[in-house]
Image: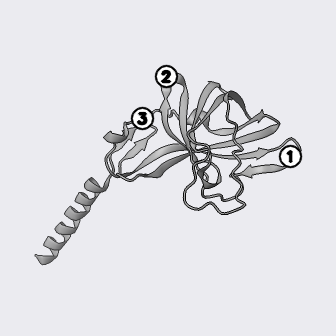
């Protein structure tokens, strides 16, 4: 009898754990205040998929290559709550006209530079990205990518602050913003 009681308790515990531990799944663009703790904001309509790929553009003598991938269940941490979301993550390489690499987040592990999608505007074919800025967060802001054809996207970079730094920025740190501060810059899929 004790064995039956023990097995029943374990089975009920597993069922309850499954029910209560599964995070609530919500669609992209759910308002932040409507996302509960540990929820999953999922790309239910595949809005992110058309942007995946490698894109190139030239701006003021520099060649910019974007590597856009989709990450599922990306942890988003804020001061009020944590949740998971599907997001596009952008890594990039910026080269000058002689081919010298100025900044590379694709092949080097630069943990302080992040560029990932935070929301979409489906009716405008636009994805909005958070950019943490370059070293010491200089140039942090928003980047808007608009799908204009199957192989082209339009770029708009809106920096929020060009001199913001957190903590002590070590002397000699490169604070140059290599991403193009431009509107309607066309990137072509490779």
Name the residue located 41 percent from the left edge and 52 percent from the top edge. Answer: 78
Name the residue located 55 percent from the left edge and 56 percent from the top edge. Answer: 166
Q: Nearer the viewer, residue 17 or 156?
A: 156
Considering the image in quadrants, where does the N terminus appear? bottom left
In this rendering, would 65 be left or right of 127?
right
Residue 180 image offset from top left, x and y in percent: 70, 37
Disc 1: which residue: 99
Disc 2: which residue: 123
Closer to the N terminus: mark 1 or mark 2? 1
Label 3 to label 2, Cα distance in Å?
12 Å
Label 1 to label 3, Cα distance in Å?
39 Å
Considering the image in quadrants, where does the C terminus appear? top right
Query: Please, is residue 185 above or below residue 80 in the view?
Result: above
Residue 188 image offset from top left, x and y in percent: 73, 31
In this rendering, would 174 be left or right of 168?
right
In this rendering, would 37 be left or right of 64?
left
Disc 3: which residue: 29
> What is the tally of numbered marks visible in this picture?
3
């Amino acid at each position: 009898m004790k064995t039956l009681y023990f097995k029943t308790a374990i089975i009920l515990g597993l069922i309850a754990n499954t029910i209560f531990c599964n995070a609530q799944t919500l669609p992209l663009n759910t308002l932040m205040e409507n996302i509960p703790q540990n929820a999953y904001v999922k790309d239910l309509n595949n809005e992110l998929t058309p942007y995946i790929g490698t894109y190139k553009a030239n701006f003021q003598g520099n060649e910019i290559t974007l590597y856009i991938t989709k990450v599922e269940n990306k942890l988003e941490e804020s001061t009020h709550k944590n949740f998971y979301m599907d997001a596009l993550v952008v890594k990039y390489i910026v080269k000058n006209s002689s081919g010298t690499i100025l900044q590379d987040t694709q092949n080097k592990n630069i943990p302080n530079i992040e560029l990932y999608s935070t929301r979409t505007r489906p009716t405008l074919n636009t994805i909005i990205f958070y950019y943490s800025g370059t070293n010491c967060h200089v140039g942090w802001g928003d980047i808007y990518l608009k799908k204009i054809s199957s192989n082209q996207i339009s770029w708009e970079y809106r920096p929020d602050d060009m001199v913001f730094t957190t903590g002590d920025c070590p002397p000699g740190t490169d604070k140059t913003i290599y991403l193009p501060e431009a509107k309607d810059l066309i990137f072509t899929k490779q």
